[in-house]
Amino acid sequence: MPEVVFDCCVISNFALSGSLSVLQSMFSGTSYITNFVSAEISRGMQSGHGELVSVKEALKDGWLLEIAPETEEEKTLLEKLSVSLGFGEASSIAVAMARDYLFACDDKVARGEASILGIKLTGTIGILSTAVKKSIINTKTANSYLKKMIAHGFYSPVTSINEIDSS
């Protein structure tokens, strides 16, 4: 699988639904969050979303890695994008652009910016769909995870993976 950098929404969807194992199976050793996304996860934990601790555990386990924008190119793009996006999304796009990573994001504006820059995209639904296609999970399990994500506030464009996997 390609190297992927997750924004806060996507990684949170999987953490809050108890399905980080799907990401581990698909992207172990090639999964990243930026230091800005890590800070957002910490704020979420402090706000009462204790399930997000699983993201911190994934970092400790080493299958998810924390990175920071380091090069001048990454820092310049982060600064430019942070005018219209949050630091988590802006830093993730900057890293994805400079390092040719897949960007996992559900935010429409951030996806639009990434698309303009030619960055490869996926999101929560795309990851669940791919996990089903690769037999990492079955459709029933994917739908169960999706239902939990929606219950935690994910604004999904579909209510069932079956809506997109029928093609």
Image (cartoon, rainbow, N blue to C red):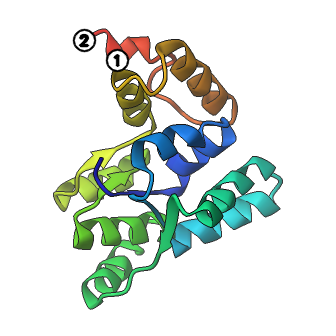
Identity, as a three-letter code, of the amino acid under mark 1: Ile
Asked if 138 appears above or below 61 in the picture, the reply is: above
Which residue lies at the image location 60% right of the left edge and 64% below the top edge?
Answer: 59
- Looking at the rendered structure, the secondary structure element under dot 1 is helix
Q: Is residue 17 visible?
A: yes
Q: Position of residue 55 (x, y in %)?
A: 64, 56
Classify 10 Å Cα crowding around label 1: few (below 14), some (14-19), many (20 and above): few
Q: Quadrant of the C terminus?
A: top left
Q: Nearer the viewer, residue 112 or 63?
A: 63
Residue closest to the far bottom: 72
Q: Are marks 1 and 2 in contact (CB under 8 Å)?
A: yes
Residue 104 % position (x, y): 39, 50
Amino acid type for the residue under numbered disc 2: Ser
Name the residue rendered at 61%, 61% in the picture: 61
Indicate left or right for 35 with 133 as reference.
Answer: right
Task: Compute the Cα span from label 1 to label 2.
Answer: 7 Å
Q: Which residue is mark 1?
A: 164
Give the number of the disc on residue 167.
2
Which structural element holds mark 2? loop
Instruction: Describe residue 66's horizontal placement relative to residue 39 as left or right.
Output: left
> How far from the left and from the top, in percent, is residue 90?
40, 69
Q: Nearer the viewer, residue 20 or 110?
A: 20
Residue 84 seen from this side: no
Residue 116: percent from the left, percent from the top? 18, 57
Residue in the picture at 50% in, 66% down: 65
Question: Could you tell me which residue is drawn at 51 percent across and 37 percent down?
Answer: 22
Q: Is residue 25 above or below residue 99?
A: above
- Give neighbour class at mark 2: few <14, some 14-19, many 20+ (Cα, 10 Å): few
Q: In front here: 167 or 151?
A: 167
Relative to 15, residue 77 above or below: below
Q: Quadrant of residue 46?
A: bottom right
Quadrant of residue 76 within the rendered picture: bottom left
